[in-house]
Image (cartoon, coloured by chain):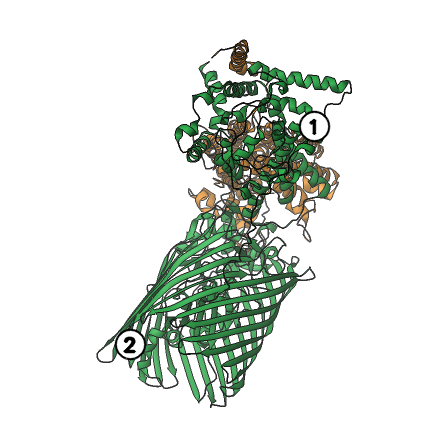
Amino acid sequence: MVRTAGDLRGWLVLVALGAAALVQPLACNDGSKAPPPTADVLLELLADVGPEVVEPALLGASQSADALVAACLAWAEAESAGGDTSSARASAQEAWRGAMERWQEVEVLQIGPAASSLTAVAGLDLRDEVYSWPTTNPCRVDQETVYGGYAQPDFFEVSLVNSYGLDALETLLFSAPAVNACPGQVDINADGSWDTLGEDGVQQRRADYAVVVAGGVRDTIVSLQQAWSAQGGDFSGKVARGGEEGSPYASPEQALNAVFDALFYVELQTKDKKLARPLGLLDCAGTDCADEVETPVAGGSQVWIAANLRSFRALFTGGAGTGMDELVRSLGEEELADAVLSALDQADAAAAALTVPVDVAATTDPAPALALHAAIKGVTDLLKGDLATLLVLQVPSEAAGDND
Amino acid sequence: MTERLWLVGGVLLGPFLEPDSRTWWPALLLSLGLAVLVTGSLRGALGGWALWSHRSSVLDLKLLVARRLLGMLLPPASLGLGYALALALARGLDHTLGVPALPAPPGWALSAGYTLLLFVAWDLSRWLLHRLMHEVPLLWELHQVHHSAEVLTPLTFHRVHPLESVLYALRGALVSGALAGLVFWLWRGQVVELTVLGVNTLGLLLNAATGNLRHSHVWLRFPAPVERWLLSPAQHQLHHGLDPALQRCNHGTWLALWDRAAGTLRRAPEAPVALGLPPSERNHGHDLVSALLGPLGGVARRLGALLVLVSPVARAQEVSAEVPEEDEAPYSVTVVAPRGVPRVGGSAHAVSEEELERWGYDDIHRVLTKVPGVYVRGEDGFGLRPNIGMRGGSSDRSAKVALLQDGLPLAPAPYAAPAAYYFPLSSRLVGLEVFKGAASIRYGPQTIGGAINVLTRPVPTGPVASLDLAVGMRSTAELHGVAGTGDERRGVLLEAAHLSTRGFKELDVPAPTGFSRQDLSLKAAAGSSKTGLELALGYGRESSSETYLGLSASDFAQTPYRRYAASALDHMAWQHTEESLTWWLELDQGLTVRTAAYHRWLGRAWTKLNRFSGGPDLHDLLLLGGEGQSEVYLAILRGEEDSASSDQELMIGTNDRTFHNGGLQSTLLWSEQGRKLGSTLELGVRLHADDVVRLHTEDPYAMTDGALLATGGERLVTLDAHTRARALSVYLAEDARLGPLHVLPGVRFETIHTRLDEQSPRVQQVLLPGMGLYAEILPWLEVLTGVHRGFSPVPPGAPAEVRPETAYSGEAGLRLEQGQSRAEAIGFVSQYDNLTGQCTLSGGCTDSQLDQQFNGGEARVYGLETLAEQVWLLPHRLAVGGTLSWTYTRATFETGFVSEFPQWGPVTAGDPLPYLPAHQGTATLLCEHPRAGLALSATGRSAMRDSAGEEQPSVPGALQLDATLHVWPTDRIRAYASGTNLTDAVILESWRPFGARPAAPLQLSLGVEVGEPRTPRQAVLASRRGSSSW
């Protein structure tokens, strides 16, 4: 095998190269490695979506829902006891604001069970069970208050989502005691049953109703937690194992699409429905645009938008784990990742600068709300444009030719 | 450490395990097989130990190992370069030139084109770089390593200096990235490279075929004409020749084009040549270190020389002087012959007046379901909005079928709006002709599936008068009267028909359902059989409280005949007029000319629920159900929940449309018949124009306490358009009889001008050949076959990238007939180059998509139509008969794609076409006596998909039983009872337009007809002609 000195030198070189290759993986661990292959980053991203983003958000929502249940119970007890119930009601309102803010972080994360069964893979519509905006109906809630259907054990089975959830709680907790949202011809007004209840009767029923609804909100959030947890439905694992048996996603790329689709909440809901509509920028010709605002009675629409943006950031960055920004960087798109984060910073700053609800801003000083709309558009334009291009574009693979 | 050993082992074995490597083990095995064929033995193919142990081969292997190990230690030179380039290019073009709106050819064509483009670009770039490796002295220093091989084995492919590999990798990244970016920009990611195991198909195939013989001892030449296009292994081995002149030829990898263009192509001689480099010209020895470092030294020397401005030898000049002239190998140019000879022929099926009368159907769908090869999609349960398809063509609004009435176009605007519909009342029909396969090219413009010609009552040659009155369940009333007179010279016929019912659906709120229709026609003729004129005038109207809105799956299961409150305002009204004047002339020489001028007008307005203002899509909502917000929207449809936001408002639209069509049509028939030979030549010419004016508006309504109340919101105009079409059609068909054989060639030509508003007109011209053969093999046996090119034009306003639907269709079959028995079986196949989907509102499209046509790419439809009939003549003037027909159809897409066309969705290759049952059949039992007749039928079909890309939910299979009983107390009076859907089966017919649509439940009717004397005996005989084919 070794016939000349040259042969010997050649073998030595090969042995040296082989030895270097064997130790090379060690050298890579010191952080000097080249960018990891995209497929690995994708799998890391998918593995982190549940544990690092969705589950923490659900935990926060669950804890605030517990507080909401307790506050509603306290309000109901205060109503039963009679006397001044304003403090207990105010506490319940405050707990609702907390729960809403936490839930608005989950709103963006409509992946799998929370998402619509009409449009999403493995969607179970559970999001609507907690919060069905813009499908709300305060009059329906007032009717239920009079009918007392909430006290029936099958209330959640036979009722529509606009009778319960955080949107119904807004009506129950914040509506003026003597006022209902139904027109005069609707039965509770036409037959006098609303008036018969009287102000105290209405508030007692609203408080009792709120206890039931708050419990339903908490239970659904717990269901969602169980659906995602490794000990329960392990949807986290199903996202992580896209393409494998047991996962509803046919491939990791389809699971990534689900994550990517969820980000579009900020485009379709936050930017268009929560901002553009009340501001009269979109689909609002001839009607009172400001009425289209989210939570018009309780206010706080600007807070929910800020929460949506926080959640968008968490999903984009993967929380403490691997996120879409790393995926983008692994594709050599440092600038794009930075641009999205920079646009997000600007949107956050614009959200912080909007200190009144969107409908109030629309009728008084719309400039901060318009600035927020523009800032969010800056984020979503990147989402729809360069980011989408980046994730869709593929470079073909070549069969090896001479000298390749 | 074990893990790392595996890792290193995997890297070293990569060239043999990775499909994109030329030395992938299956490719090596294939090459070995080929080598055995060339050398005649395995030993000869393997080459012997001397070859593999040669110092050159050992260096090949060492260089391979060294390069792989270096690859592990150093980051790939092209990491992310291709991707970055593609991304930068796509974005740069986006930002500077915008997103182009280019016509998008079908997916398969784009992918095939892209794959070919990549292959050619890669090949060209390799040739270019390879040539530079030889021409540029600096690069030649590196490339010498490859050329110093003294023997060639497949491993010599890997005998490349690492720096040269880097250059080739950069080349690949640049080419791939540039093309990927450009193609992405042009077609937005619709283009996917055709790959096998992730590798370019063409590259993989060529690598596997002869790639490994390029570096081998096996001398394989291609025939001279081939070597001018594709480089043979021997041509590359010649490139490795010891003679420097040889090294300056054949730089290409696969294609010889580049060398031909550069004048460096050389044919392979008969015998191999000596290989390698002269010792004086090589910069390295025979060992690994020398092979790695020697070229670097050479490069350094060259660079040093450059630095002192000493110009190296201009090799390029030498090359141009030294390369010998290429051998001018003789080769022939083959002109591909046109595809067959134009032909026409094909099968046809007739439904006689007796057959129509026997069943007395008011619903054209029920009549056609009994015809093999015809499929219908029910919608309202009455066939008011016919959805008829044939042999795999979409049934949606009968847009893919040529519809005629007495040979003249029946559809309101067959060119400008193919999906527009009008059908005369079934009671007015005295026959139907269904032309399938090649037989359909006489008609048009739809010539793929077939044509249906409905026949109305002819002008009588004597006095006629009849009155038919029937009443049935659900206030159904039918009246049909005919009065006329005539003789051999003139005649006149007046006909009136009425049909009304309150329908079988129960609205949630008090509001009308059902429909009322009236037809009135007048025909007058004067002349003789030699020449004459006929004038036909017709008027029709309909007022129907019909809707697009069906039910959710759960509501359908509980109350299938329910109608939601949200459809309470839905109403269709139309009026229709038709006029035609026909002139015929028969000359003595067997020449007949028949010319008709025709005009048809239809004005209609359909007010109906279109959508929620901002809620979910109605079709998805009702198909999938869903929970949460979906339940609220469903409750609003039912009237159980009020609209509480602008999103929940119901958009009720009025689609106001006016259609005209008119034209001049002439047919010339020239027949010469001898005893054994005969010829019938038919020439048809039609000049046609049609148009449609559409004004579609929508008004918002709120559901309030179960009632729809106008919100007073702004009326939206969703479509305001005028589309026009002009067409000239010519066909020529011949029936040449040669004894028992009929040869039926034919050809159709159409030129179509269409225009939407003031947009640029689209001009389509098409030549459609066809050919049929028909032979009477035995007195009781006939065989037929036919093939034709079918076409369905692009409607006006479609984007420029939309192409017409085209297909090659063929059929073959046989018929047996003896005594009272008859049977036939006809197999058919259609290979669609481009199946198209025509957007209709009823099919789930939006106003903005209306009439748009979507490309579905290649599809294949094949199947078998069978029919068997038997009549037994029994004592006591009784006749008993029966028919069995069964159609099997397999219709699938051949490529995968994602379509916005609602009935396709995300399609993968092999998905079946929607609303096309694999099995469909009818069994009938007839029992006739001169004074009475009984007919029973069972019609069934298998399950169908609602959307091609979605397996579930589907439209389940169904079986319906119908029966009629006729009694003739006198020759002039017929009393009858009929029942449809006798078992009262709940049948889901369709999920479109929105939600589950039921077929009509049990319907019983009683009627009496007073009319012309009739010989009951004819009825029995007619039963056999009732459903005949030719």
Q: What is the secondary structure assignment of the residue under circle 2?
A: strand
Judged from this view, the residue extending furthest toward the right is B309
Q: Which chain is green?
A: B
Query: Considering only vertical position in the picture, is A216 above or below B147?
Result: below
Q: Residues within 10 Å of mark 2 (few under 14, many from 20)?
A: many
Q: Is residue B78 visible in the rendered structure shown here?
A: yes
Chain under callout 2: B
Residue A215 falls left or right of residue B417: left
Q: Position of residue B365 (x, y in %)?
A: 43, 66
Q: Nearer the viewer, residue B688 or B629?
A: B688
Q: Position of residue B848 (x, y in %)?
A: 61, 55
Q: Nearer the viewer, residue B232 or B872?
A: B232
Residue A72 falls left or right of residue B987: right
User: Which dot marks residue B928?
Assistant: 2
Q: Which residue is mark 1?
A: B315
Q: Which chain is orange?
A: A
Q: Position of residue A355 (x, y in %)?
A: 70, 34
Q: What is the secondary structure assignment of the residue under circle 1?
A: helix
Residue at mark 1 to residue at mark 2: CA–CA distance: 99 Å
At label 1, which amino acid type do we have?
Answer: Arg
Q: Is residue A82 visible in the rendered structure shown here?
A: no
At label 2, which amino acid type do we have?
Answer: Glu
Query: Considering only vertical position in the picture, is B9 above or below B542?
Result: above
Labels 1 and 2 in the same subunit: yes
Mark 1 and 2 residues: CB-CB less than 8 Å, in contact? no
Q: Quadrant of the C terminus of chain B?
A: bottom left
Query: Considering only vertical position in the picture, is B599 above or below B861?
Result: below
Q: Position of residue B206 (x, y in %)?
A: 51, 37
